[in-house]
């Protein structure tokens, strides 16, 4: 069942900005109230994890505004749902990862470094699904 491109793009943007925003707020609270001097490690870990996809989403939104390409053309719902659910899984993993560090014996910097590999795999899948969803309109033309 096809979905409208405009609505799907808005929902993906809401998912990404909500997920990244909640994680950002949680990290702000952690860094503000923590006595640990290594809290800058959290930001070195978090920002590269969300910036590429948020930049992609903002770039697509600005491109649509500039080119007035915000048509409600139907697009494949499978690609939309795949991109949405991979994004939700990735953002959820990103949110819970810092809160799991007290349950490990590794120092925070080592724990976050070790978490990058599995998170990078899920990020790559989510980013690929987002990219495939965003370009499917051009492929149909």
Image: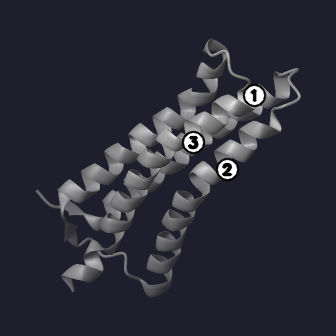
Instruction: Please give the name of the residue rendered at 54% of the width and 27% of the height, measured from the top-left corner.
Output: 96
User: Of marks 3 and 1, which one's residue comes earlier in the chain?
Assistant: 1
Instruction: Tell me the mark number nearer the camera, choosing from 2 and 1.
Output: 2
Reading the image, the residue beneath label 1 is: 29
Instruction: Please give the name of the residue rendered at 49% of the width and 64% of the height, measured from the top-left corner.
Output: 57
Q: Are marks 2 and 1 in contact (CB under 8 Å)?
A: no
User: Of marks 3 and 2, which one's residue comes earlier in the chain?
Assistant: 2
Give the answer, above or below, for where 77 lies relative to 87: below
Furthest toward the left, the residue is 1
| Quarter occupied by residue 102 | top right
Instruction: Please give the name of the residue rendered at 38% of the width and 66% of the height, measured from the top-left corner.
Output: 131
Which is nearer the eye, 47 or 121? Answer: 121
Reading the image, the residue beneath label 3 is: 116
Marker count (numbered)? 3
Q: CA distance from mark 2 to mark 1?
A: 16 Å
Q: Which SS class for mark 3?
A: helix
């Amino acid at each position: 069942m096809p979905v409208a491109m405009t609505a799907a793009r808005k929902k993906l943007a809401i998912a990404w900005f909500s997920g990244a925003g909640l994680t950002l707020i949680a990290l702000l609270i952690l860094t503000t109230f923590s006595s640990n001097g290594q809290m800058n490690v959290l930001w070195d870990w978090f920002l590269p994890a969300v910036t590429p996809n948020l930049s992609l989403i903002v770039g697509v939104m600005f491109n649509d505004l500039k080119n007035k390409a915000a048509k409600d053309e139907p697009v494949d719902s499978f690609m939309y749902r795949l991109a949405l659910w991979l994004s939700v899984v990735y953002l959820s993993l990103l949110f819970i990862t810092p809160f799991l560090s007290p349950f490990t014996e590794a120092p925070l910097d080592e724990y976050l470094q070790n978490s990058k590999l599995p998170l990078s795999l899920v990020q790559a899948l989510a980013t690929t699904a987002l990219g495939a969803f965003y370009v499917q309109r051009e492929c149909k033309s």
